[in-house]
Image: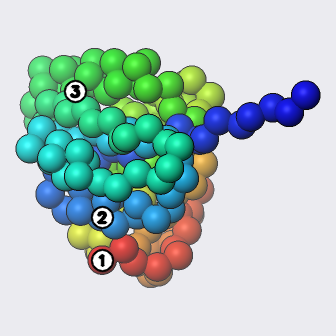
Amino acid sequence: MMLVQRPIRVLALASSGGHWIQLRRLRPAWLGCDVAYATSNAGYRSEIEEEEVAPGLPAPRFYSFPDASRWQKARLILQLLSVIRILLLERPDVVITTGASAGYFALRIAKLFGRRTVWLDSIANSAELSLSGQRVARYADLWLTQWDHLVAPLGKAGPAPSFRGQVL
């Protein structure tokens, strides 16, 4: 009896703007996977609806979540609940994010579910690693920075990120 293996389910999640642009430039990394996208800008839906899909794969799914910053506690709670909902609906094998707060939540929760996780720190963080990246470091199976001079251990906070090039 021959078993048919299902494609890897990927949740690619990022805040809008530069985080989203960098995430979308990583698309070749999940070719052949069953992909869902999530972002804080519902207007990006049309971008996903126009994406070409490999034969035999479902069309990518799209979700949006509330935008929030660390100074907006109530919105952060709404964002967290939205990210949990997306993870429960999608049940991804892998979560990939370029940040920020929603990416932090997604990686922490995905790790609780036993999923693989990838954090790519934004290229905008050229002087130091992002606060979200530093806090999520120990939960990321793969933590990447886009600046080679930022590859340094964080001590008790977690391992050092890896550098494998820049997205932009």
Q: Which residue is mark 3?
A: 79
Q: Earlier in the sequence, mark 1 or mark 3?
A: 3
Q: Quadrant of residue 7?
A: top right
Which residue is identified by label 1?
Answer: 168
Residue 103 in sight in this render: no
How many numbered discs, if any? 3
Q: In the shown orientation, is residue 28 left or right of residue 52?
A: right
| Disc on res. 22 | 2
SS class, disc 2: helix
* Element class at badge 3: helix
Labelled pair 1, 2 in contact (Cβ < 8 Å): yes
The residue closer to the viewer here, 110 or 88, is: 88
**Is there any visible trace of residue 81 in the rendered image?**
yes
Vertically, is 111 above or below 34?
above
Seen in the picture, residue 38 relative to 121 is either above or below; the reply is above
Label 1 to label 2, Cα distance in Å?
7 Å
What x and y, as percent, mark residue 154? 51, 58
In the picture, measured across the screen, residue 135 lies left or right of residue 38, that is right
Relative placement, left or right, of 137 versus 25 is right
**Which residue appears at 35% of the width and 25% of the height?**
86
Residue at horizontal 50 percent and vertical 57 percent from the top: 31
**Disc with the residue nearer the chain's start (1 vs 2):** 2
Binning the other alpha carbons within 10 Å of mark 2 as few (below 14), some (14 to 19) or many (20 upward) gives many
Which is nearer the eye, 11 or 1? 1
What amino acid does circle 2 point to? Gln
The amino acid sitting under disc 1 is: Leu
Q: Amino acid at mark 3?
A: Gln
